[in-house]
Image (cartoon, grey):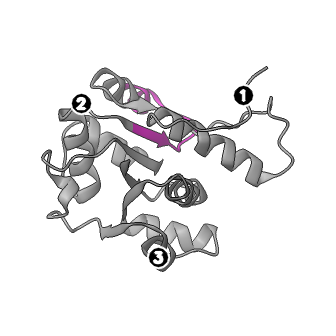
Amino acid sequence: MRFVVALTGASGQILGIRLIEKLIELGAEVYAVASAAAKITLKIESDYDEGYVREIATKYYDEDEIAAPFASGSFRHDGMAIVPCSIKTASSIAYGIADNLITRAADVTLKEKRKLVLAVREAPLHTGHLRTLTTLSEIGAVIYPPVLSFYTKPKNLDDMVDHTVSRIIELLGVEVDYKRWG
């Protein structure tokens, strides 16, 4: 298993961190990339930093490293997740603006018909956002806003984060055990 995980500047950095950790625990190779805004938000929201992402990922790249292997369709991987995904990044992907490694890799993922999961973190959404998300869905992306699930009876924030991340992993096509409805 080989996945690309990108973190952008939206709130919810712990989701991206936990996704990388869980995929590694499941034996996957994880090629991680973080935007400049993600690095800032990561420091604001958590006790983690870019160094930790570098440490836990199989390989790590900055968003300006456009020659990274997953910027090409010839690099085989099982899917990409952008967690959290900013509206800026979502908009760039929807309209083919591949001006950094994250948007280029997402564009390649879509053109190669691989799984692309976007954990879009924005609320409320205006009509322009909704049109962008519709376009993304129409071109093959899976839009998965990290909406909390209360049927799991979470005891703390970690329970909510783990449930959300498990759903994303499942959307990437990996069998994962987690508490389900019913």
The residue nearer to you, when weighing 113 against 131, is 113
Up-down relation of residue 6 to residue 164 (above or below): below
The residue nearer to you, when weighing 92 against 52, is 52
User: What amino acid is labelled 2 in the image?
Assistant: Lys
Q: Could you tell me residue 47's position as x and y percent?
A: 64, 75
Q: Which residue is mark 2?
A: 113
Task: Inspect this view and state whether residue 99 appears.
Answer: no
- What kind of element bears circle 2? loop
User: Which of the two labelled residues, at mark 3 and mark 1, occupies the earlier sequence position?
Assistant: 3
Segment tinted magenta in the rendering: 117-131
Q: Are marks 3 and 1 in contact (CB under 8 Å)?
A: no
- Residue 55 has which mark? 3
Residue drawn at point x = 12 percent, y = 47 percent: 74
User: What amino acid is labelled 1 in the image?
Assistant: Arg
Q: Which residue is mark 1?
A: 180
Circle 3 residues within 10 Å: few <14, some 14–19, many ≥20: few
Up-down relation of residue 105 to residue 36 (above or below): above
Q: Could you tell me residue 127's position as x and y percent?
A: 43, 26
